[in-house]
Image (cartoon, coloured by chain):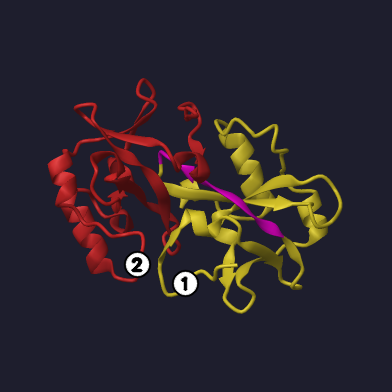
Chain colours: A yellow, B red
Amino acid sequence: MEQLDENATVISAAKVTGTAVFNTEGEQLGEIHDVMLDKRSGKIAYAVLSFGGLLGIGQSYHPLPWAILKYDTRQGGYVVGITIDQLKGAPTYAASEPPAWTDRAYEARIHDYYKAAPYWSV
Amino acid sequence: MEQLDENATVISAAKVTGTAVFNTEGEQLGEIHDVMLDKRSGKIAYAVLSFGGLLGIGQSYHPLPWAILKYDTRQGGYVVGITIDQLKGAPTYAASEPPAWTDRAYEARIHDYYKAAPYWSV
């Protein structure tokens, strides 16, 4: 996998996609499937984690608030402070049923779950 | 080409990529090659326009400040208020020579060229 350049403050969405995501125990949770952008505020909204392929259950997509991802050069991936059990209870959708993304209440629930400040309020 | 959903405020970077870009005269300038993200501010920094393929010159990448792109549902693409001649004089790079993206002065030049407020100051 291509290492992201940590010196660059500006990074390519295409390179973020496919990057591994680990928890703080070093377990790989999955990888970044896509990055979601908020048009109105011009903010990066979510990194969508694809989860489940490695664990033998159906792959699901979990939108993670962008602010909770930290890049770790040693592991060559993002680290988030969530357990696999927490992820299993998190807001999720199947590839065939993406959310409408028109609903701030749904987005608020995502941010609440991860105890992250909503990107549209900071 | 897949139409972007204009009702959604949150859109997929993967779907933005490949979307056509037109100028206000309806000329197609090219298409979005990638989206650049500013890690520190959490802002969408640039849509990188790939330009030249249709016009018979070597394809080049032009980072366009995100704020200058407006989506037009009728054309199914983004519209920007720049002429082809303006684009030929704009900050650009070849696929083989991407900028380091560590230099705010370079980024300020991009925003100056398009008379856009720098995303890190708004």
Magenta region: which residues?
A: A30-40
Main secondary structure type of the part rendered in magenta: strand
Q: Is residue B16 above or below residue B5?
A: below
Q: Is residue A30 above or below residue B82?
A: below
**Quarter residue B100 falls in:** bottom left
Q: Is residue B51 above or below residue B36?
A: above
- Find the residue positioned furthest to the bottom: A74
Around disc 2, counting alpha carbons within 10 Å, would you say few (fewer than 14), some (14 to 19), or many (20 or more)? some
Asked whether A11 falls inside the magenta stretch, the response is no
- Taking the image as shown, residue A18 lies to the left or right of residue B92, namely right
Asked whether A36 falls inside the magenta stretch, the response is yes
Circle 2 is placed at which residue position? Answer: B101
The answer for which chain carries disc 2 is: B
Q: Are marks 1 and 2 on the same chain?
A: no
- Taking the image as shown, residue A31 lies to the left or right of residue A73, namely right
Name the spot of residue A4 as percent of width and height, x first: 51, 69
Query: Mark on residue A5?
Result: 1
The answer for which chain carries disc 1 is: A
Instruction: Say what amino acid the circle numbered 1 marks.
Output: Asp
Name the spot of residue A51 as percent of width and height, x first: 74, 52
Asked if the residues shown at circle 1 and circle 2 are in contact, with their CB atoms under 8 angstroms apart, the answer is: yes
